[in-house]
Image (tube, grey):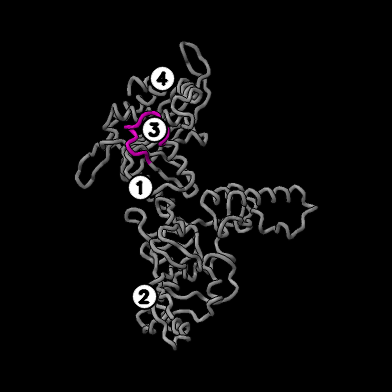
Amino acid sequence: MTTEVRSLREFKMPDVGEGLTEAEILSWYVKPGDTVTDGQVVCEVETAKAAVELPIPFNGVVEQLFFPAGATVDVGTAIISVAVAGEAGAVAPAAAPAAPAAEAAAPAAASAEPEPERREVLVGYGPRTGTAQRRARRTTTTTVNATPAPAAPAAPVAPVPAQVAPVVAEQPVGGRPLAKPPVRKLAKDLGIDLRAVVATGQDGVITREDVHAHASALAAARAAPAERPVEAAPVEALPAPVGTTGDVRVPIKGVRKATAQAMVASAFTAPHVTEFVQVDVTRTMKFVRRLKESGELGRDVRISPLLLVAKALLTAVKRHPEINAQWDEAAQEIVIKGQVNLGIAAATPRGLIVPNIKDAGGKTLTGLAVALGELIDTARQGKTSPGDMQGGTITITNVGVFGVDTGTPILNPGEAAILAVGTIRDMPWVHKGKVVPRQVTTLALSFDHRLVDGELGSKVLADVAALLERPKRLITWG
């Protein structure tokens, strides 16, 4: 008789960016006992740059998850072990006690609890019904019908579970609620505690529909308090009124941590200068409406004022390429970039990110509209890749979407300029010798005064303003 030889393989946290040292596990898509195949996504992690889904590079059955969702893991640390099938081997007649032998072959730090109980304690998922601790990580390949190996070499990995144990102990019953970043943002905006939401998604993941259903149930319960059973909506499940609770501490990590470090470095490295100009964009808004109604850029292409702002800035950069530059401190040189990678600052549930459109200056208006729409959609879904945020040369930040008139934007590190666009308001304006209501916005251009002097910065800002005031110039100037 023959049996299949199985060995354990560990999948380690990869460096999904350039030189990143750690990542937070947002959610697991598998659990112990699940079969996985080469290329299957097993978890989603958040780095200092983006949220990324990790595919596993081999086939097998999930043996153990070493970290729960919410844990921050160093690059190079094993996060999951998988039992991988090997070659078939003969089983000796006296192989009946093979299962105890396999347990003896495990490292000395392995837990002694029965296998069913160990499989029920899924790290970061499900109820924890006992006090049994999970097994220590295996760092050597173990064969089911092999002769037990000495356990001493596995001793150095004992401290790793000790680092994980406090994280597991601090999790609420059932572990951290599983939900995508956009769903967490929705729950936060609605004042919903995800621990009180019933999950209907695959593997217990909370969906947007679950959050909306819970919000509707709470609203109905509040509307008829006399008819509501107390146990249907316990007081502790309702969000506490603002000002009635103590301080809330939010860990600084991931994108927010990287953004903070980058902004501090930029603010205290590059000497910022900011210039402002108010612009009559009435014609630009009419041009946007005409493009939408005519469909000349394509029926499925998203048209917005930001598209024309981007095109105006790219045209100004083409006329003044010195603004698209970088300061090389080591070489003591100013590097004028050969192409324009246009960054668009985007507020996401994980913090501020600045993905960029590669070679935006070489795109037509239609191509720019398509690229801008894809960039915004990807950022909203939390799927922006690290590569999309690298290599930017100049940036636009649209503070107008928040009803803000203007600001003094901080440069994206390594870039020479950033343009802030304020909200568009109806204002009294002198037009053709008369004071009439016009649609007006404020532009603010911050630039690195080491590379960009006042003349260059003023020319670029004036060009953008002139193009938005009379958008037909986008054709003649471009």
- Whichever of labels 2 and 1 marks the residue nearer the N terminus, that label is 2
Of 278 and 322, which appears nearest the observer? 322
Image height of 134 relative to 97, above or below: above
Question: Looking at the magenta stretch, what is its main secondary structure?
Answer: helix
Q: Which label number is shown at residue 140?
A: 2
Q: Residues within 10 Å of mark 2 (few under 14, many from 20)?
A: some
Residue ID at (44%, 54%): 53
Q: Which label number is shown at residue 387?
A: 1
Task: Report the quarter where the C terminus lies.
Answer: top left
Which residue does the numbered mark 3 point to in the structure image? 368
Of 43 and 39, which appears nearest the observer? 39
Q: Quadrant of residue 398?
A: top left
Q: What element does badge 3 sit on? A: helix
- Whichever of labels 1 and 4 marks the residue nearer the N terminus, that label is 1
The Cα atoms of the two marked residues, 1 and 4, are separated by: 35 Å
Q: Are marks 1 and 3 in contact (CB under 8 Å)?
A: no
Is residue 215 covered in magenta? Answer: no
Q: Are marks 2 and 1 in contact (CB under 8 Å)?
A: no
The residue most toward the right is 226
Q: Residues within 10 Å of mark 3 (few under 14, many from 20)?
A: many
Amino acid type, mark 3? Leu
- Whichever of labels 4 and 2 marks the residue nearer the N terminus, that label is 2
Residue mark closest to the camera, 4 vs 3: 3
The Cα atoms of the two marked residues, 4 and 3, are separated by: 19 Å
Amino acid type, mark 4? Arg
Residues drawn in magenta: 356-371
- Whichever of labels 4 and 3 marks the residue nearer the N terminus, that label is 3
The Cα atoms of the two marked residues, 1 and 3, are separated by: 19 Å
Q: What element does badge 4 sit on? A: loop
Residue ID at (60%, 73%): 129
